Amino acid sequence: MGIEFFNWLQDVREYSRVSRRRRGLRQPGRGVDYTDDRFQDVVHSTVSRIHPRRMTLQVKEIIQETPTTKTFRFERRDGPVPPFRPGQYVNLFIEVERVLTSRPYSLSSAPGAGYLDITVRDKAEGFVAPYLLKNVRVGDELESSGPAGTFYHEPLIDGEDLVFLAGGSGITPFMSMIRHAVQRQSQLKIHLLYGSRRPDDVIFGHELAKVADSHDNIRFSLVISEPPRDYQGLSGFLSSECIQGQVGDMAGKTFYLCGPREMTDYCSAALRELGVPPWKTRQEAYGPPGDVTKETGWPKGLSGDALFKVTVVGGEIVQARAGEPLLNTLERHGIVVPALCRSGACSACRMRLLSGRVFMPAHTGIRESDRQNGYIHACVSYPLEDLEIKI
């Protein structure tokens, strides 16, 4: 009895000691208050490892995927590869022709691989993509943001029956999702409909076909829009007829769309025609439109080459083309603006419009409160007259 009482007393004393040490750091029912100053170093280092604001990446390998496309495989030089959700992106910060700019690229590698892959397709009218493809070599170092974005599978909302509609390089986030599902031996039902112009330029085509052959829960339907004469597979566009013919019953399925704006707009209309409710459709932002003057609501008669004066409060005055995103204009004049998605969704490039008018495409994700209070997203804002802005 004496020994048991002694052990019990020791337990009580230990509890009292711990309780005294934590007194002032706890609130009833709320656990430890980690905002207390004594925890700041631990909290900061933990958050920085999981959600780094910037990363230094070194090119470990370059993989030629198709005649127009390469995958750049990076290892991180300033810390571990952070966790991310399949479908997220990183934003590469780069200097091209003495212009400091950035571009977001979806990660095509799966989480946990120990490296980060971005897959880049050449664009004849591009600025950053051609530079990366022609100039970046193994061993080069680039700076990027940490993983970001909300285009990923949410099991409780999206369910387990998924249809991916991809166009061109829009395959990259889906590749991360599919690779992750294969690695985890997930029983998600995935049906990928992938639209490509030519059969010899299908990114990840061989890997996707192999995965579909060896996994009953993953289907792959390739649709070629410009087929050669002897082509035997599916051809045309991802129309309502094509989608229904391949997918069948729409009920219970969640549809993900990623690709050029023209493709996602076309597919969105097709899904509406098939009766798919909006809450069963997820769409990834894909940059500004190729030609903003063709967007609904663009002022009639206004040329994309029209020039306007942009006055930056506390800075300089620059000339801006109506048809160029304001963010691009500022970068070309050496004015660096924080940016991540460059699609109007993340608000990193948010700035105050003090005077003048801008055009923003209807699909941009700017908040209504920003519109009412005079804020714009520079990456999808086009000057319609002289402007005054505050960055």
Image (cartoon, rainbow, N blue to C red):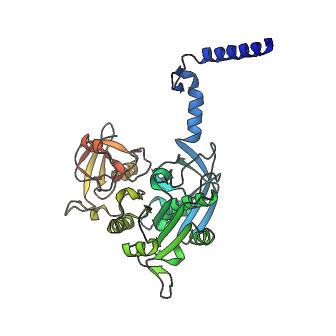
Place of residue 163 in the rendered image (x, y in percent of width and height, measured from the top left): 47, 64
Closer to the camera, 41 or 181? 181
Rendered image quadrant of residue 363: bottom left
* Rendered position, 48 above or below 8: below
The residue furthest top is: 2
What quarter of the picture does the N terminus occupy?
top right
Q: Position of residue 114 (x, y in %)?
A: 65, 51
Q: Residue at x 34, y 47 (%)?
A: 377
Instruction: Write the residue at 45% across / 71% down.
Output: 247
Residue at (26, 39) in percent of width and height: 373
Q: Is residue 55 something one can see in this rendering?
A: yes
- From the viewer's side, name the closer residue of 311 and 230: 230
318 lies above or below 373:
below
> Can the viewer see residue 196?
no
- Residue 45 shown left or right of residue 260 in the figure: right
Does residue 113 lie above or below 50 as drawn? below
- Percent of width and height locating residue 160: 51, 58
Quarter that holds the C terminus = top left
